[in-house]
Amino acid sequence: MNVEDETSDFDIGRIDEVIHGRVRLGIMAYLSGVESADFGELKARLQTTDGNLSVHLRKLEEAGFVAVSKSFQGRKPLTRASMTETGRDAFLAYLDAMSALVAGR
């Protein structure tokens, strides 16, 4: 069997570019395992800057993959993020597409 036959079912278009970025993938992976996470927690886990995390959270929020809520704890602002059902479905589809790439299907 030639390489073309082995990979004929693989569609590179199935890889969601919104999720595929390193920081956004990290956000999605982390949020998939928790109910929600605060901004500081995500920043520490992903080892990124405030500005970088804000940009990537906004992109995921605009895609409907993440819900971001802002409140105050006393006088301190608190930003929390959680994965939406749409985001969970997109993340699972992304993982499936990546598995297909690795498996050559």
Image: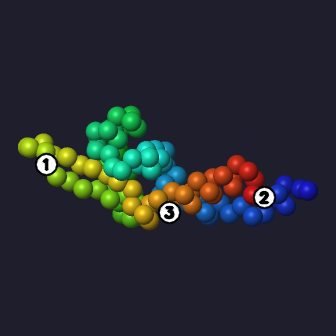
Residue 69 place in picture, x, y as percent: 24, 56
User: In the shown orientation, is residue 95 left or right of residue 63?
Assistant: right
> Can residue 27 be seen at all in this image of the molecule?
no
**Quarter assignment of residue 12:** bottom right
Q: Amino acid at mark 3?
A: Asp
Q: Which residue is mark 2?
A: 7
Q: Secondary structure at mark 1?
A: strand
Q: Residues within 10 Å of mark 3 (few under 14, many from 20)?
A: few
Q: Which residue is mark 1?
A: 72
Q: Amino acid at mark 1?
A: Phe
Q: Which residue is mark 3?
A: 89
Q: Secondary structure at mark 3?
A: helix
Q: Of the residues under marks 3 and 2, which one precedes in the sequence?
A: 2
Q: Who's the residue at 84% across and 55% down the image?
A: 3
Q: Of the residues under marks 2 and 1, which one precedes in the sequence?
A: 2
User: In the shown orientation, is residue 10 left or right of residue 79?
Assistant: right
Q: Secondary structure at mark 2?
A: loop
